[in-house]
Image: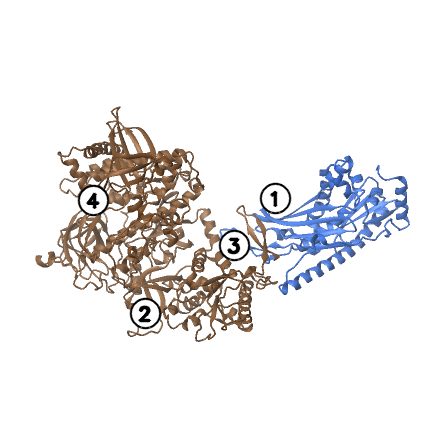
């Protein structure tokens, strides 16, 4: 070994500079890892002895890509066709500095033995290490290091005793580098040329990202400047520091992709700042952290929001923009809203997007494979269309595909991207479900073998043993009348309850939660996976589990390859069922929260303990309700439920008095047809008393646990808070209600709760529910947080009106609860040893951030799934239904149909409206009028609902049109009763038929 | 001066008068010296000078960023510091006979203990620090201080010169000057990129590449010190420890390559008559210029050798403390 030093200059946080010197050792025992090499002493050579040969490089060869190939063409490198690649250390280190996500992806490929990517430590190899030369830039030095390594490999492979000759080919898109390589007799190629030879995988050519400068040069030639240049990072940082600019996350409106808001501090107040129009958004994309500059007041947005629906083509987009930007009819009735423009992007949130190719943008005849530029539209309407080049335009039409953005030069209206992969045909339910999982970043891959190995070796035969009771200080509750109450068909029973009278006249109430942390220990791969997933995701027809199934055999595969596979309508067996789930008549480990309560349901004492229980019954809500109602039932269990029910009512009463909110959201349930899983009926979810029973005790347990863990871990308790929504969130609702002389007090949840109770119109029984639904939308998201990162007064849960709260009761499906279980166990067991994961507040914060993100995504995925099934349900149907107007727009109104829990926009003007009408938007009364007919907020309307494939049939879209009140030339005629009410069932005669939405 | 007998003193004094010193040199002969730069990789510049068989000085230069002084907002600073490594504690131990290990080292520098007895460590450090600071702390040293300012009114570079005396065998101040000049020659300041944020505000970035660094401006004008010791009626340069003990008065003159005088410091108790003083200054100018010429030549030779190796991508190995006379 020999020693070298590497040095660089680093600026410290305080602003000073230090010269950092690192010792660097060179070795002579780093092997080439080629299976055909006999001179190296390696075992388990990774690189195949028979790598691929191509048209241009006829000798079988390994590939050595340079750094930029990984940076720009990572999708290609991930493609299964690319194998036997040498990843140089120089390249990996450069990637680590350039982009952590890419670096991690490369590491993932290297870890995948099937890909045969060998990480060669050329920087530590005595013969491939090079000193940087004088006046040589670091980049040139690294390029040279790569060439030296390629040369070394070529010589090394040529010298050894080989069965068959093997060589190496360097991939580089840098012409200069290739010239230098050629002059040193190194074989090299550009990525485009190389993959062009791989004729069996033609899609690779499409995946080639054109070098950034090339595409920008191209854009410069053919384009005028469309956008302002972004300011430099330093200018932004300084501007933000001195208050000239603000920064925040760009949030594009779901209704109008040309309108966005950024939560930022303007005029000393944290508020939503509008960004209107493509120019002002200045190439920022949904989710980007942007720097904004507030515009002068004269340019502030004064108009009501417009809904823009579909971006048909470029021209129309530009027109839509000019309409919304220039066509402002200035009206001083509306308060001016702070408006800003984006002057720089601090952090890009680019990711690969699911979507489809706009059919209109495809040229040429069917089957043509010449390269052409096409427009890609993302499923997420907030993402701009992306221009990319492909040879498979005709094959990809009608498919769901994934496309990534490469760059967005100032001269290009649209961002430029490249094709990544195809998911399947549009409209296919499996494809669409995969799309929505991908779009919401839900990890849905199968659990790996490593994770499944963490399950108990006994498998299904695992039982509670004496040692669990004697050695683990578990209390034995097996004799108690414990029972569970859950929705029908529930497989993962997290919680069970019991109550019994105590000799002193009080009652003992117990909540027993599945003891998941007995099986999931910190640091296990299973634990890491669950922490990453964060939550189980419930879709209409399936769920994506957080914890692995006990039986990980192929028969029980969670997700079947979606392309052409026949779907098995089999539910997987989660670990919950066999090991955790508190099923009836099976002994199970539990974590119990035991209260002593007096007859007024006031807590006298609380105790927590690990336990063993044996549930006597698993009720559904309905069964439990029937028992309560049936006077003939006088057994202990039924009496227990009655006691619990009366306690729950008292608890609820007290909670409501304190100001807990009763909110509403229209939740629907689909009845699925058994084989095809097609929806045959849709109904609103219904709540029974017993739902509330379980809920009350779960809330109580969560609160008790929260208090306990916060006392022990003041800095790192995982809690859940629901921040008080800012007053401005209620602005629109308040204005709408003022027309009904209803005032909305929002300063405390108690006042809000009271004013919601007062918001009643006798003539409209649905009115109150509607107000509650709309109030729900004014709320902020509840969030997990680490107690050390927030002030104690901010712990409050606004909706539940309690000062402290956490999640304890569903560890099978929520990772937060797993963590809380661990915290609580550390509270009650003084002997327990635990690591930093429970005490480090920053680690806890990172975990919370991920859980919050996963939760939000899970909710959105669930919603998208409902939307998917709603559209499936209305497919081939025309339904007429009563609904309520819940929002008035300048060019339309939003209708909520309570029967199906759906909402949609009825447009009164704009490109979608073909007929002439005289509907006028009145800003003062916030209504749309035409003659006598007036459409006001909360007003009742009758609408026709149908699924209207857009022009391309690629985006399922629910169309609502107005029937009543009748507006001549605008409303649709009521169709003949027979046609309108007939429900056409999906066609099951041909099971292989693809579903078209 | 208790450790030097009258006989020894006479021997040295008369030797000076007859231009023959105890080690065989003439009055104006310099001892051989070993010099190497760039031996502290963590520093921005460094040099080690070993003079004769004993005096050994290591100088490290480190640059840091600081706010400018309000009354001089367009210049940077040079801050010097000299420290005696271990020798003082060694002397202390020797004199009081505490530690036998230290006694062994007295063989190499027998007089050190005598001379420094009674001095506090801080006094010696301060004396040398000030001598260096007086010459290098201001524009007389030739460095372009304005170039050390990064952004006017905001930040500037501070150049810290830290000299460490590793071993002593006379003429330490001249050795420090020489090592400092060599270390500054070796010093590279990281490059900065200034960004205009508009509204008269600026921010700068430091380039992280060690190669992207530049020399101090005005490096060629940095003076060295020539110390003349008056012994009897004559004066000598590059005094040995015993000669220093016999010195009645000494004059350290900082001279740059153009023979300009950049500073004069008088030391020891005795006086110097004006005629001799003027003669000493002339001597110092002449010797200083020739020393600088030789020093610059060596430094450039060394740098060329390093550059040649680097051009070929060869590893550069320093001799470091293995270098001997």
Task: Indicate whether B298 appears above or below A331.
Answer: below
- Residue A295 shows in the view: no
User: Residue A612 in the image: x percent, y percent?
Assistant: 31, 37
In the picture of the structure, the residue carrying the numbered disc 1 is B71
Asked if both marks, 2 and 3, belong to the same chain, the answer given is: no
Task: Provide the residue designation for mark 3.
Answer: B195
Question: Which quarter shows the C terminus of chain A?
Answer: bottom left
The kind of secondary structure element at disc 1 is: loop
Secondary structure state at the residue bearing disc 2:
helix
Respond whether the residues carrying marks 1 and 4 are from the same subunit: no
Provide residue B197's location: percent of width, then percent of height: 49, 52
User: Looking at the image, is mark 3 or mark 1 earlier in the sequence?
Assistant: 1
Rendered view: A401 above or below B154: below
Which of the chains is blue?
B
Within 10 Å of disc 4 (Cα), the crowding (few <14, some 14-19, many 20+) is many
Q: Nearer the viewer, mark 2 or mark 3?
A: 2
Residue at the spot 14% in from the left edge and 43% down from the top edge: A764
Q: Nearer the viewer, mark 1 or mark 4?
A: 4
Residue A552's place in the image compared with A740, above or below, is below
For residue A393, which numbered disc appears in the image? Answer: 2
Kindly identify which numbered label has been placed on residue A770: 4
* Chain under disc 3: B
Determine if marks 4 and 3 fall on one subunit: no
Letter of the brown chain: A
């Amino acid at each position: 070994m020999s020693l070298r030093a590497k040095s660089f200059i680093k600026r410290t946080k305080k602003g000073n500079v230090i010269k950092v010197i690192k010792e660097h050792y060179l070795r002579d025992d780093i092997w080439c890892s080629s299976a055909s090499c006999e001179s190296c002493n390696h075992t388990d050579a990774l690189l195949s002895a028979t790598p691929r040969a191509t048209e241009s490089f006829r000798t079988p060869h390994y590939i050595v890509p340079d750094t930029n190939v990984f940076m720009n063409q990572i999708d290609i490198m991930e493609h299964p066709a690319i194998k036997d690649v040498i990843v140089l250390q120089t390249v990996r280190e450069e990637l680590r500095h350039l982009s952590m996500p890419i670096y991690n992806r490369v590491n993932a490929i290297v870890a995948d033995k099937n890909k045969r990517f060998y990480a060669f430590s050329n920087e530590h190899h005595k013969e491939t290490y090079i000193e940087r030369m004088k006046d040589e830039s670091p980049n040139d030095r690294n390029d040279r290091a790569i060439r030296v390594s390629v040369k070394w490999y070529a010589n090394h492979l040529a010298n050894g005793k080989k069965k068959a000759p093997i060589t190496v080919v360097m991939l580089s898109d840098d012409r200069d580098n290739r010239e230098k390589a050629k002059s040193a007799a190194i074989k090299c190629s550009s990525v485009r040329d190389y993959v062009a030879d791989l004729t069996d995988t033609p899609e690779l050519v499409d995946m080639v990202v054109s070098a950034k400068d090339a595409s920008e040069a191209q854009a410069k030639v053919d384009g005028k400047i469309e956008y302002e240049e972004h300011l430099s990072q330093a200018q932004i940082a300084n501007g933000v520091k001195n208050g000239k600019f603000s920064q925040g996350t760009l949030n594009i409106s779901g209704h109008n992709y040309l309108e966005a808001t950024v939560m930022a501090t303007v005029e000393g107040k944290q508020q939503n700042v509008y960004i209107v129009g493509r120019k002002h958004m200045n190439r920022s994309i949904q989710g980007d952290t942007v720097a904004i500059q507030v515009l002068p007041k004269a340019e502030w947005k004064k108009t009501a929001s417009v809904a823009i629906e579909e971006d048909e083509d470029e021209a129309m987009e530009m027109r839509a923009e000019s309409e919304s930007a220039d066509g402002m009819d200035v009206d001083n009735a509306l308060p001016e809203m702070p408006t800003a423009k984006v002057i720089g992007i601090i952090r890009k949130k680019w990711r690969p997007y699911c979507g489809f190719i706009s059919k209109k943008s495809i040229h040429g005849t069917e089957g043509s494979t010449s390269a052409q530029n096409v427009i890609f539209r993302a499923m997420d309407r907030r993402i701009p269309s992306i221009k990319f080049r492909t040879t498979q335009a005709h094959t990809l039409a009608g498919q769901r595909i994934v496309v990534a953005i490469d760059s967005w030069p100032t001269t290009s209206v649209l961002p430029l991207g490249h094709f990544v992969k195809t998911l399947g045909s549009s409209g296919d339910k499996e494809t669409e479900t995969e799309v929505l999982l991908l779009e919401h970043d839900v990890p849905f891959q199968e659990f790996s073998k490593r994770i499944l190995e963490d399950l108990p070796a006994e498998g299904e035969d695992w039982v509670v043993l004496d040692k669990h009771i004697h050695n683990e200080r578990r209390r034995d509750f097996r004799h108690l009348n414990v029972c569970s109450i859950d929705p029908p068909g529930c497989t993962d029973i997290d919680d069970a309850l019991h109550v019994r009278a105590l000799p002193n006249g009080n009652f003992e109430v117990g909540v027993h939660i599945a003891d998941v942390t007995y099986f999931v220990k910190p640091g296990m791969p299973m634990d890491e996976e669950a922490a990453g997933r964060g939550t189980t995701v419930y879709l209409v027809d399936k769920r994506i589990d957080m914890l692995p199934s006990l039986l990980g055999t192929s028969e029980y595969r969670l997700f079947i390859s979606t392309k052409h596979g026949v779907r098995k309508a089999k539910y997987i067996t989660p670990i919950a069922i066999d090991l955790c789930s508190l099923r009836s008549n099976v002994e199970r480990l539990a974590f119990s929260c035991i209260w002593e309560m007096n007859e007024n349901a006031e807590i006298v004492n609380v105790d927590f303990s690990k336990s063993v229980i044996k549930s006597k019954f698993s009720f559904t809500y309905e069964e439990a309700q029937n028992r309560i109602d049936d006077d003939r039932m006088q057994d202990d269990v039924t009496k227990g439920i009655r006691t619990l029910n009366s306690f729950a009512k008292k608890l609820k009463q007290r909670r409501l008095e304190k100001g807990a909110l009763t909110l509403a959201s229209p939740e629907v349930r689909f009845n699925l047809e058994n084989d095809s899983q097609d929806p045959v009926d849709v109904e609103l979810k219904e709540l029974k008393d017993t739902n509330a029973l379980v809920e009350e005790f779960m809330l109580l347990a969560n609160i008790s646990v929260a208090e306990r863990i916060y006392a022990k871990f003041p800095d790192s308790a995982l809690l859940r808070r629901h921040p008080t929504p800012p007053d401005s969130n209620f602005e629109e609702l308040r204005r709408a209600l003022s027309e009904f002389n209803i005032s909305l007090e929002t300063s405390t949840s108690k006042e809000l709760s009271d004013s919601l109770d007062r918001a009643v119109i006798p003539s409209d029984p649905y009115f109150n529910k509607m107000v509650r639904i709309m109030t729900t939308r004014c709320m902020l998201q509840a969030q997990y947080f680490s107690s050390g990162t927030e002030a104690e007064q901010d712990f409050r849960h606004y909706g539940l009106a309690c000062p402290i709260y956490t999640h304890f009761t569903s560890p099978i499906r929520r990772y937060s609860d797993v963590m809380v279980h661990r915290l609580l166990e550390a509270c009650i067991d003084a002997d327990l040893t635990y690591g930093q994961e429970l005490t480090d507040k920053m680690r806890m914060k990172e975990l919370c951030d991920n859980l919050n993100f996963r939760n939000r995504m899970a909710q959105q995925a669930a919603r998208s799934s409902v939307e998917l099934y709603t559209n499936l349900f209305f497919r081939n149907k025309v339904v007429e239904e009563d609904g309520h107007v819940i929002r008035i727009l300048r060019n339309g109104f939003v209708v909520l149909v309570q029967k199906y829990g759906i909402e949609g926009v009825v447009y009164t003007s704009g490109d979608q409206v073909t007929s002439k009408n005289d509907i006028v938007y009145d800003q003062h009364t916030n209504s749309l009028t035409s003659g006598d007919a007036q459409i006001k907020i909360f007003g009742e309307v009758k609408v026709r609902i149908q699924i209207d494939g857009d022009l391309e049939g690629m985006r399922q879209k629910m169309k609502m049109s107005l029937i009543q009140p009748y507006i001549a030339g605008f409303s649709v005629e009521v169709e003949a009763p027979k046609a309108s009410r007939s429900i056409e069932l999906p066609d099951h005669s041909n099971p292989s038929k693809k579903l078209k939405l | 001066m208790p450790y030097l007998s009258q006989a020894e003193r006479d021997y040295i004094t008369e030797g000076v008068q007859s231009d023959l010193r105890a080690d065989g040199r003439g009055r104006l002969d310099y001892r051989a010296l070993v010099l190497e730069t760039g031996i502290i990789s963590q520093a921005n510049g460094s040099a080690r000078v070993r003079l004769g068989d004993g005096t050994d000085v290591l100088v490290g230069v480190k640059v840091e960023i600081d706010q400018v002084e309000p009354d001089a907002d367009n210049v940077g600073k040079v801050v010097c510091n000299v420290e005696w490594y271990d020798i003082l504690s060694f002397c202390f131990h020797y004199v009081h006979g505490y530690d036998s290990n230290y006694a062994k080292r007295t063989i190499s520098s027998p007089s050190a203990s005598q001379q420094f007895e009674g001095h506090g460590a801080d006094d010696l450090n301060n004396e040398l620090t000030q001598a260096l600071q007086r010459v290098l702390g201001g524009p007389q040293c030739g460095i372009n201080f304005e170039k050390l300012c990064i952004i006017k009114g905001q930040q500037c570079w501070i150049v810290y010169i830290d000299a460490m005396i590793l071993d002593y065998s006379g003429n330490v101040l001249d050795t420090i000057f020489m090592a400092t000049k060599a270390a500054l020659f070796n010093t590279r300041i990281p490059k900065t990129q200034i960004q205009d944020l508009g509204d008269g505000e600026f921010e700068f970035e430091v380039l992280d590449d060690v190669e992207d660094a530049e020399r101090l401006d005005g490096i060629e004008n940095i003076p060295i010190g020539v110390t003349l010791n008056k012994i009897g009626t004559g004066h000598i340069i590059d005094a040995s420890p015993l000669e220093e003990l016999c010195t009645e008065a000494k004059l350290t003159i900082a001279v740059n390559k153009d023979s300009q005088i950049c500073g004069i410091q008088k030391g020891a108790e005795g006086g110097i008559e004006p005629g001799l003083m003027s003669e000493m200054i002339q001597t110092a100018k002449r010797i200083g210029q020739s020393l600088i010429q030789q020093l610059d030549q060596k430094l450039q030779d060394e740098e060329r050798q390093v550059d040649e190796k680097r051009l070929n991508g060869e590893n550069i190995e320093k001799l470091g403390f293995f270098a001997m006379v």
